[in-house]
Amino acid sequence: MGSTFGHLFRITTFGESHGGGVGVTIDGCPPRLEISAEEIQAELDRRRPGQSKITTPRKETDTCEIVSGVFEGKTLGTPIAIFVPNKDARSQDYGEMKQKYRPSHADATYDAKYGIRNWQGGGRSSARETIGRVAAGAVAKKILWQVARVEIVGYVKRIKDLEGIVDPNTVTIEQVENNIVRCPDAECAERMIAVIEQARRDKDSLGGVVECVARNLPKGLGEPVFDKLEADLAKGVMSLPASKGFEIGSGFGGTLLTGSEHNDEFYTSETGGEVRTVTNRSGGVQGGISNGENLTLRSPFKPTSTIGKQQRTVTSTGEETTLAAKGRHDPCVLPRAVPMVEAMVAIVLCDHLLRHHSQCQLPMTNLDPVSQSELRTRN
């Protein structure tokens, strides 16, 4: 009912935070793609909890198992199932939340919709669900790299009011992974880490912005009008837990410019005679279709809802009370949100790459056209 995403490259995630495990089924992956559990694990390790002093201390190895769809290191073209067991759930920490709704969390809305919820760790609304997305994103990244050498790099752009200076055209994954907050601006990263640590001591949380760039993206991806590339990217990224917005290229800042200031003028490159743009305020997408320039997007993530500070709330029966939440939670989701954003961007781009190829790159023969009436006569 809402756990499946994509058209040709189609994923379905499953599992709850404190259940037996979580995972994903991937349908539509082309056959003969070389992929290993180690490649998928490398992406999951970037997302897993307990990886640094500024993330949740929950100790999960998030070790993945490829259950189906891969044989002797290559995809079969059949559904790929990937499973990750939960090993370090402490459901007793959430006993008080069985009745009390966490402010700004999904507790109350899940009750309102389903009339039942898994209150242990947030159940299905937990960010632990994103394990399946990141695993699928690893496969999508491999396809994009194999076919077109597409490179996707996400990073923390801002924490609260601290904003790093990063050039999306040149930033590398090595620069991103060089510190625990995943901000390539080393000086700003130190200050970000300090404010996150302070928020943890204050039993509070912080939000910020993740920026992501996809380089070497082919022209022509996107399906106007309802499945424009930026529309599907927005849906994919905003389906992530705690994501509260989306912008591409100039984004909201572009509203401050005039048309003559904002337009990306065209020119013909000296090598190959390719049509390019002088600037890239469009963010690599025009008319809902990729134009060959770097695709740049941003998404804000709100402060983590579950905090240790006492707040007003109500119970599931409507009684007013207070709650100082227990459990193990990120004081800031941004460092672990980076691989999640990358994964959703990769899944969308991979899906559109397959869709574009199926519609626009189908080989046409040079045989003489035959009318329907001639075919009926022949038959």
Image: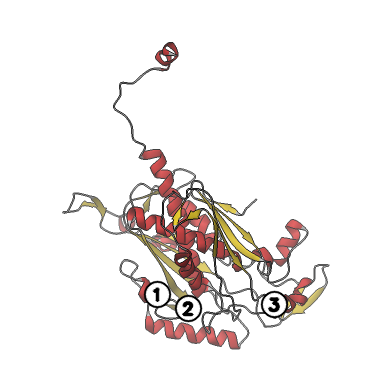
The residues bearing labels 2 and 3 have C-alpha atoms spaced at a distance of 34 Å
The answer to whether residue 290 is left or right of residue 327 is left
Q: What's the amino acid at mark 1?
A: Val
Relative to 295, 237 lies left or right: right
Q: Secondary structure at mark 1?
A: helix
Looking at the image, is mark 1 or mark 2 nearer the viewer? 1
Q: Residue at x 40, y 59 (%)?
A: 142
Q: Is residue 132 left or right of residue 118?
A: left
- Name the amino acid type tagged 3: Arg
Q: Residue at x 47, y 82 (%)?
A: 192
Residue 90 is labelled as 3
Residue 87 sits in which quadrant?
bottom right
Observer-nearest residue: 286 or 114? 114
- Label 2 vs 3, first from the N-terminus: 3
Viewer-side residue, 258 vs 16: 16
> What element does badge 3 sit on?
loop
Q: Which mark is residue 161?
A: 2
**Disc 2, disc 3: CB below 8 Å?**
no
Q: Residues within 10 Å of mark 3 (few under 14, many from 20)?
A: few
Instruction: Calculate the distance from the C-alpha at mark 3 to the C-alpha at mark 1.
Output: 32 Å
